Amino acid sequence: MVFFVVADTMVRGYIDAIIDDMSSHKTEQSEQQKAIIHEWTMDQVRSASKPNFGKLFVTAPSLFSLLGNVDGQNVLELGCGNGYWLRLLTRAGAHCTGIDHAENQIEVAKLWDDSTTKQIDFRIGNVGQDIDLQGKFDVVFFEHVLLEIPDINTLENAIKNAADALKPGGVLVISDIHPFAPSSKPSNLRVSDDFSYFKSGTPFEIQSNRVDGGVIYYKDVHWTLSDIAHAINRAGLKITDIIEPLPNSQDVEKYPDELGYRLNCPIAIMFKAIK
């Protein structure tokens, strides 16, 4: 219990620091920020580096709770982007490695002005292809990665790579958009009129509202709950927990427009599995 109190205090302090910093640096929404991104220009990478409300108030507390005590553990993030989560986990005492296929994401991660940056091993690599890190990690996780993978074979390969990288008894955590979210059609998701939950691989767009006032759009790919669960099982892992994170009441009261809709729509999901 002590770790969870410490982790929650650390995350809440980090959240407050980010909001205080960004409140004095409001930015106008540019045409680039409005554009659908996936090619990851440097401007887009920098824009996406600024956290959104879901990441700060929903994913961060839930992810730390699900991961448990990472102090002294070897942690791998597949699809690490700019290293946001790895910096948090390094502060919690983890020895972190991050892999991403986008060279400019890794470049930004390595140049990040943070005392933890030099402690993290950032590498360029494709999470859907073989990675030479078998059996080295206590924890492997994906955060908003699987729904960026456009075909089921690559998705299954990515989860198999994660499983191979784990030590016996190691933990895999997957955090992503809820498979039911597109069908619920919240205001920040855009889907085609003929969208079907059972049509795996269907693209949709999501609007991310950053805490500095900016907005950025992502194009993601829909996978069903069974697509993800079967991929985890085929990788030889046992699912031990599935949670659907929600914001707490105090944060919803403070940011009702940005967080309130999450109380009525399934927006986020996390899987925990053991090797």
Image (cartoon, rainbow, N blue to C red):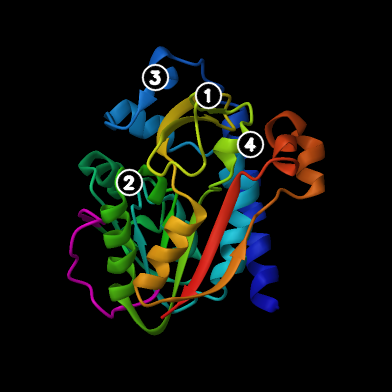
**Which residue position holds label 2?**
149
Point out residue 234 in the picture as x, y percentages from the top left corner: 35, 71
- The magenta-colored residue range is 123-139
Of labels 3 and 4, earlier in sequence is: 3
Quarter holding the N terminus is: bottom right
Q: Which residue is mark 4?
A: 184
Secondary structure mainly formed by the magenta segment = loop
The residue to which callout 1 is attached is 214
- The answer to whether residue 141 is visible is yes
What amino acid type should be assigned to the residue bearing mark 4? Ser
Precedes in sequence: disc 1 or disc 4 = 4
In the image, is 133 to the left or to the right of 267?
left
As measured in the structure, the alpha-carbon distance from the residue carrying label 4 to the one carrying label 2 is: 21 Å
Q: Indicate the quadrant containing the C terminus: top left, top right, bottom left or bottom right.
A: bottom left
How many neighbours does mark 1 have within 10 angstroms: few (below 14), some (14-19), or many (20 or more)? many
What is the residue that sits farthest to the bottom in this orientation?
168
- Eyeballing the image, is 140 above or below 84? below
State which mark lies toward you, 4 or 2. Answer: 4
Residue behind mark 3: 35
Q: Horizontal and vertical percent for residue 217?
A: 45, 27
Residue at 78% in and 36% down: 254
N-terminal of the pair, mark 4 or mark 2, is: 2
Say which amino acid is labelled 3: Ala
Mark 4 closeness class: few <14, some 14–19, many ≥20 residues within 10 Å: some
Disc 2 versus disc 3: distance between alpha carbons? 19 Å
Question: Which sits earlier in the primary sequence, circle 1 or circle 3?
Answer: 3
Q: Describe residue 201's horizontal placement relative to residue 64 as left or right.
A: left
Q: CA distance from mark 1 to mark 2?
A: 25 Å
Point out the frontmost of discs 1 and 3: 3
